[in-house]
Image (spheres, grey):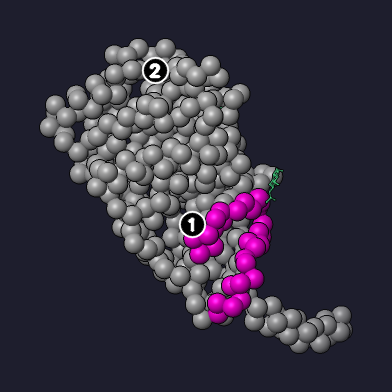
Amino acid sequence: MRLFSGLTFLPGIAGALAAATTSQTKTIPNSHPAIYYHGRWDSSPGTWWAGSGLKLHVKHLCSLALNLGPHTTAPFAAVGVSIDYQDFFTVNASAGANVIPLSSSLADKRGDTTVVRINVEGWQNNRINLESVTLNSDAELLPYGPSRLAFQFIGDSLSAGQFLPLGVDQAWPFLVGEHFRAEHRITAQPGATLTDMVSYGNVHGVSFQFFRTEDTGYYYTTDHNFTTPWNFARDQPPATHIVIHIGANDASHSISDADFVEVYSKFLAHLRTIYKHQPIFVFTPWGWPSADGSISQYYEGQYQNIVDKRVATGDKNIFLVDTTGWVTFADVFPDNQHPNVPGHAKIAAKFAAWLENWGLRAAPQWATPV
Ligand SMILES: *[C@@H]1O[C@H](CO)[C@@H](O)[C@H](O)[C@H]1NC(C)=O
Ligand SMILES: *[C@@H]1O[C@H](CO)[C@@H](O)[C@H](O)[C@H]1NC(C)=O
């Protein structure tokens, strides 16, 4: 007992230290209803697929840290962060506490609110396992009101932002979402076919994996080596516009025109069980441009065929987006022919103009203004 009595002064000091610490920060658990999750999250909760993430609407924000758990990619997952709808920047986030650098101008905004948007940038090494968020203790977490426009993009490397410095945050689907001040969900898997087959490291095709929580990277993990159905009721608000750009990898595996049309038609019928009334936009390929100015095409005429077949079933809300000529050799990385950063911006501008001509208008302001 003498040993313990010697420690009796400690609670006073410890209490003072604890008070000093808690007067600076407070920790919000991942279950807080005001955390707006988007994209695909498993129950840990952890992200899969490039672009998945969270949004926070905070009053009096001065400091922010993400506390990540063991299902986070090691050594880190590249995370894109945007404060108050400004440009995204990268934070390499790891298991443990990750301080998010906030602009010092936020200190002048006290009394106002801040929106922080966070998403994983990569098509691989893209898992963040959110345990909690730490804020300055006088910050107040408010609900984030999502846009009433919500895009669902479906694709492969050409949509996932593979090879871009900021990954999906510089890819045309993401930029289109930004243009319209929309929510964007991007379910795109580099190397994947639409056909459910093994392709360039993907154990499944998009016609299977789109309906799952996990991207095909699950197969290469030891802590989550399985895949589970995605509960589409978790997409809130439900997608309002569906955009599909796929087929490059089917073509490179010599899937025939007839087989591709069949798998695509079945995929559309499956999508219609979830997206009953939403417009669906089917991209033709822009092709693979070469230095000599030629462009290698695939499935020419087949995308029109797919849309026509669907219309013949009575589905009038499906549209072909002819991207012929959108991408030239100047718009791609010469060594892999994927769009470069200005190339993605060009595609985004072309598709935004196409959608405006079709009748879509950008929201006049973000749904949660700052
Ligand atoms: C993230 O890590 C990559 C690879 O190590 C590095 O090139 C990049 O500079 C890092 N970015 C930041 C913002 O720390
Ligand atoms: C994941 O499980 C499959 C069998 O379903 C196995 O072939 C594969 O090697 C496993 N991956 C890892 C990284 O353990």
Picture layout, residue 38 above or below residue 190: below
Look at mark 2 in the image and give the residue it sits on.
Answer: 298
Q: Residues within 10 Å of mark 1 (few under 14, many from 20)?
A: many
| Viewport quadrant of the N terminus | bottom right
Q: Position of residue 326 (x, y in %)?
A: 41, 31
Picture residue at 34% right of the left edge, 38% below the top: 243
Q: Position of residue 110 (x, y in %)?
A: 55, 80
Picture residue at 49% right of the left edge, 22% below the top: 289
Q: Is mark 2 within 8 Å of ligand 2?
A: no
Residue found at the very far front of the displayed protein? 293
Picture residue at 55% right of the left edge, 77% below the top: 109
Look at mark 1 in the image and give the residue it sits on.
Answer: 54
Q: Position of residue 304 (x, y in %)?
A: 26, 24
Q: Is residue 42 visible?
A: no
Snapshot quadrant of residue 271: top left
Question: Mark 1: which amino acid?
Answer: Leu
Snapshot quadrant of residue 249: top left
Q: Position of residue 307 (x, y in %)?
A: 23, 27
Question: Mark 2: which amino acid?
Answer: Tyr
Residue 90 located within the stretch drawn in magenta: yes
Front one among 45 and 238: 238
Picture layout, residue 317 above or below residue 312: below
Residue 269 located within the stretch drawn in magenta: no
Q: Give the residues drawn in magenta, as a range.
A: 81-110
